[in-house]
Image (cartoon, helix red, strand yellow):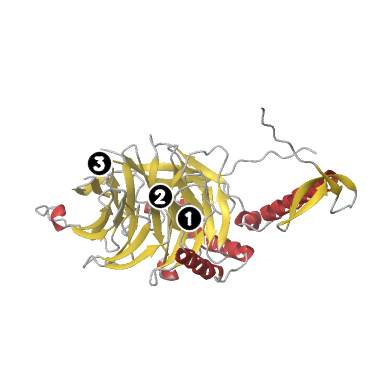
Amino acid sequence: MCDQTFLANVFGSCDKCFKQRALRPVFKKSQQLSYCSTCAEIVSATLKKIKGQLDTARARAAGLHQVAERVEALGQFVMKTRRTLKGHGNKVLCMDWCKDKRRIVSSSQDGKVIVWDSFTTNKEHAVTMPCTWVMACAYAPSGCAIACGGLDNKCSVYPLTFDKNENMAAKKKSVAMHTNYLSACSFTNSDMQILTASGDGTCALWDVESGQLLQSFHGHGADVLCLDLAPSETGNTFVSGGCDKKAMVWDMRSGQCVQAFETHESDINSVRYYPSGDAFASGSDDATCRLYDLRADREVAIYSKESIIFGASSVDFSLSGRLLFAGYNDYTINVWDVLKGSRVSILFGHENRVSTLRVSPDGTAFCSGSWDHTLRVREMVFSFRVCERRKEG
Amino acid sequence: MSSGTSASALQRLVEQLKLEAGVERIKVSQAAAELQQYCMQNACKDALLVGVPAGSNPFREPRSCALL
């Protein structure tokens, strides 16, 4: 006996035109009605038209690029590598600039953390961590200490000493303790407090001296991969991004999440505040970078190209916020015009993924670290406008 | 949302969403205009945008070695 499903054709009076026809079910405001095929088709055509209008309205709705239409376009930029820092034995995972605009701390997969003088490329300090994959490192505001951590689930602070007889590892202070890997760390405005982000899905604020937990931030549904503190003028908030595709803005005093944004389609690898503190950019595995405005409480710009299919691992703004530098997993760095959304430069040179990227504190240069074991410090050399062919007629 | 989510977790979520919904928002056009204004005001100080005079550039190799 074969099983066959029959479509039961109800014959009756259409709820819209009242004619005697074969009817099919249509749902209107969760109430089931019976329409004839003609009326059902009219309904679906109307729905399609309204959806099309909505999509057009949304696309036209003032995003940053639409508002900045009248701004003069930037030309193409040429950025040159001024220094290549070689010395790491494995993938460079993280780097940070010192406030003196000259020194750089970087950490790598082999457990080594190195402090460089970027002008001379000399290594000033080196310490070997007891774990591999040191995914986070940060320079203290005073320039007298560095913080780092990774698979050891901890964030440790090392005071920097120029005394050749002192072993840096001897003065190590364990500050943060998480239950999973440390993905990001940053000193707050002083050497006294550290903010950390972890694979355990939380962020935390610690007192360096005592190692005490001052505040914890719960809300991410998965690993937190990055964080950035608001520029000091704008107050006590920070933004974090995670594997749950969410970027969350937190109040550091209360531990509350004050705003959350969920428009990315994959893990958010990097977040960075706009220099004015009113917005922040994010880079994600979905191959896009996005700009979120905090006062408008929504995404206002998206930086993407069909040809870019690899995730963005790291983003940072230039001093004025006009340029967005983004390092990608396809070994390149793309430089975006923040206002207009166009790409002004694509930088090659690294022989493996770009894992970390920071603009120097005075905005004169930017440094990128890569899985090819090196760091490159680059500068803008010149920019030029491509002449457009005049249209005939 | 998993079917095992407790009532208290849902309650917390509702509270959080209410908090986020209560944020005061400005229009995107205004926000975008202010971002643009910040860019324009600070463009001249941005070395990666307008460049820096060669003399004061610490990364540029010196043209002549000051060796006696």
A67 over A52 or under it: above or below: below
Q: Give the CA distance from mark 2 to mark 1.
A: 43 Å
Residue A149: % across, % down? 27, 52
**Quarter of the view holding residue A378:** top left
Q: Which residue is mark 1?
A: A246
Q: Residue furthest right?
A: A19
Task: Report which quarter residue A343 is drawn in.
Answer: top right
The lab-note entry on whether marks 3 and 2 share a chain reads no
Q: What type is the residue that disc 3 sits on?
A: Asp
Mark 1 and mark 3 lie on one chain; the one further toward the N terminus is 3
Kind of element beneath mark 1? loop
Q: Quadrant of the C terminus of chain A?
A: top right
State the image coordinates of residue B66 (x, y, percent, origin top left).
26, 46
- Chain letter, disc 2 residue: B
Q: CA distance from mark 1 to mark 3?
A: 30 Å
Q: Residue at x 16, y 56 (%)?
A: A162
- The disc placed on residue B54 is 2
Report the front residue among B4 and A140: B4
* Image spot of residue B43 (x, y percent): 51, 58
Task: In this rendered view, identify the residue nearer to me: A281 or A162.
Answer: A281
At x 59%, y 61%, the residue is B32
Between disc 1 and disc 3, the foreground one is 1
Q: What residue is pinned by disc 3?
A: A110
Name the residue nearer the viewer: A71 or A222.
A222
Q: Which dot marks residue A154?
A: none
